[in-house]
Amino acid sequence: MTVKDLAKAMGQSPKYIQEALELKDAPEEIKLMMATMTVTPAHALWTIKKHGKDGAKVVLGDQLKKAK
């Protein structure tokens, strides 16, 4: 099944499905930040794409510390 097929079956856009699939492989620390609404999925995904998975953990962790 393609992303396009899955999107149609779920009533979502292909972009939404693609991003959800990308976030499924995010580090557990980032998933926890999203689950607790500390970071939005959009910001998490942007940070992962810019810094890589390990870099995103550091960047988002630093942002979290500064916010507290």
Image: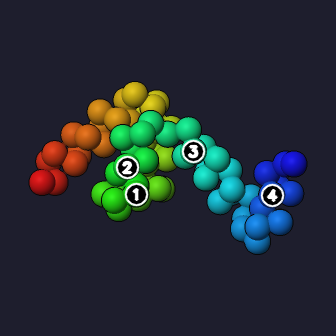
Residues 23 and 66: in front is 23
Q: Residues within 10 Å of mark 2 (few under 14, many from 20)?
A: few
Quarter of the image that includes the C terminus: bottom left
Q: Are marks 1 and 2 in contact (CB under 8 Å)?
A: yes
**Labels 1 and 4: the sequence-earlier one:** 4
User: Picture coordinates of residue 34 (x, y %)?
Assistant: 40, 55
Q: Which residue is mark 4?
A: 6
Judging from the image, what secondary structure is the residue with disc 4 in? Answer: helix
- Rendered residue at 29%/33% (across/down): 58
Residue type, numbered disc 1: Ala
CB within 8 Å, label 2 to label 3: no
Circles 1, 3 touching at the beta carbon (< 8 Å): no
The residue that disc 3 covers is: 24
The answer to whether residue 57 is left or right of residue 49 is left
What is the CA distance from the residue labelled 3 to the residue labelled 4? 15 Å
Residue 32, numbered circle: 2
Amino acid carrying label 2: it is Leu
